[in-house]
Amino acid sequence: MIAEADVDVAVDARAVALSLLPDAQPAWRLQDLLDFEPGLFTVSCLSLLDTDALDEQSASVALELVERQQAWLAEMGVRLTARVAGPTPPSPDPEVFDPVVASRSTPG
């Protein structure tokens, strides 16, 4: 079931994307994308940008958006790495583990 708020966001997102297309009417500013969470929609909007045509302020906003996307992807990569690597083994119990005995048993 789709909530009314979800429909509004989808309509707004489509309007933002369409307004970023070349020759589109400027219904939205690039800065409006700062209101959206990092994700596929923001990436798709950024992919429509002509970076050479951006003024300095718009380029600064675009850079902030790209940095947000990079952080979002990096965080996802960390979660996936942790998932693949598995749980961290517990450290030895200091009541049971004796480093002196352990050092005597290692050749060297």
Image: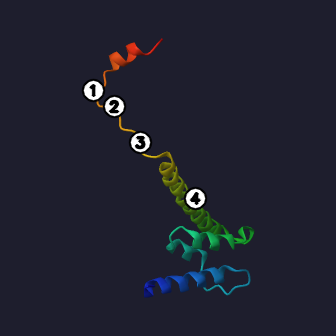
Disc 2 and disc 4 in contact, CB within 8 angstroms: no
Q: Which residue is mark 1?
A: 96
> So how many labels did they put on this image?
4
The residues tagged by marks 4 and 3 sit, at their Cα atoms, a distance apart of 26 Å
Badge 1 marks a residue whose secondary structure is: loop
Q: Are marks 4 and 3 in contact (CB under 8 Å)?
A: no
Residue 70 showing in the rendered view: yes
The answer to whether the residue labelled 2 contacts the one labelled 1, judged by CB atoms less than 8 Å apart, is yes
Left or right, residue 28 beside residue 89: right
Circle 4 packing at 10 Å, graded few (<14), some (14-19), many (20+), is few
Is residue 63 found left or right of 4 in the rendered image? right
The residue identified by callout 3 is: 88
Task: Assess disc 1: are there few (<14), some (14-19) or many (≥20) residues with their C-alpha within 10 Å of its C-alpha.
Answer: few
**Which amino acid does the dot numbered 1 rest on?**
Val
- Tag nearer the camera, 2 or 4: 2
Label 4 vs 3, first from the N-terminus: 4
Residue drawn at the location 58% of the way across and 58% of the way down: 70
Q: What residue does disc 4 label?
A: 70
Tell me the amino acid under the disc marked 4: Gln
Category of crowding for the residue at label 2, using alpha-carbon neighbours closer than 10 angstroms: few (below 14), some (14–19), many (at least 20) = few
Whichever of callouts 2 and 4 sits on the residue coming sooner in the sequence is 4
Instruction: Point out residue 29 in the picture as x, y percentages from the top left corner.
Output: 60, 79
Q: Which residue in the rendered view is the most extreme toward the front? A: 105
Where does label 2 land, which residue? Answer: 92
Sequence order check, earlier mark of 1 and 3: 3
Q: Give the number of the disc on residue 30.
A: none
| Marks 2/1: CA–CA distance | 7 Å
